[in-house]
Image (spheres, helix red, strand yellow):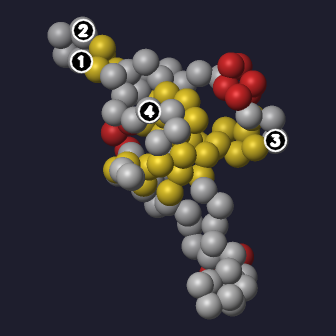
Amino acid sequence: AGKAFRKFLPLFDRVLVERCAAETVTKGGIMLPEKSQGKVLQATVVAVGSGSKGKSGEIQPVSVKVGEKILLPEYGGTKVVLEDKEYYLFRDGDILGKYVD
């Protein structure tokens, strides 16, 4: 996967993420059909842009780093396919939050 990101780098305040896999089995061991799984809102950051320009021209860095787990909005993002894997491109301002250990 690392080789794909040398060919693609998000611009400005964009963040490239890989959504986490959907839960297919409940805690009780019941298999869930695809329709009832719901949309996965958690993702891992795989690449970030350099940041956006502020009003006075200085660069404001992106608020997340590569490898962090984040919370995404239910809708939005641009689907990007790199080496047969699906990734999504979001603006830094669209990210709802990040998980901390």
Tell me the crowding category of disc 1: few under 14, some 14 to 19, or many 20 or more residues within 10 angstroms, Cα based. few
Horizontal and vertical percent position of residue 76: 49, 50
User: Is 70 located above or below residue 8 in the figure?
Assistant: below
Q: Position of residue 61 (x, y in %)?
A: 33, 22
Q: Alpha-carbon neighbours of circle 3 within 10 Å: few (<14), some, or many (≥20)?
A: few
SS assignment at label 2? loop
- For label 2, the residue is 57
**Circle 3 sits on which residue?**
84
Q: Report, in whole angstroms, how far the alpha carbon at label 4 lies from the one at label 2.
A: 22 Å
Closer-to-camera residue (92/45): 45
Measure the C-alpha gap from mark 2 to mark 1: 5 Å
Tell me the amino acid under the disc marked 1: Gly
Q: Is residue 66 above or below residue 9?
A: below
Depth-wise, is mark 4 or mark 2 nearer the camera?
4
Question: For the residue labelled by badge 1, is the local secondary structure a helix, a strand or a loop?
Answer: loop
Q: Tell whether label 3 touches label 1 (CB within 8 Å).
A: no
* Image position of 36 with respect to 40: above or below: below
Label 3 – label 4 distance at C-alpha: 24 Å
- Marks 1 and 3, the one that precedes in the sequence: 1
Q: Quadrant of the N terminus?
A: top right
The answer to whether one can see residue 16 in this image is no
Residue 58, image x, y percentages: 25, 10
Q: Crowdedness of circle 4 by 10 Å Cα count: few (<14), some, many (20+)?
A: some
Question: Mark number for residue 54?
Answer: 1
What residue type is disc 2 on? Gly
Q: Which residue is mark 4?
A: 65
Among the two numbered marks 3 and 4 on one chain, the one whose residue lies closer to the N terminus: 4
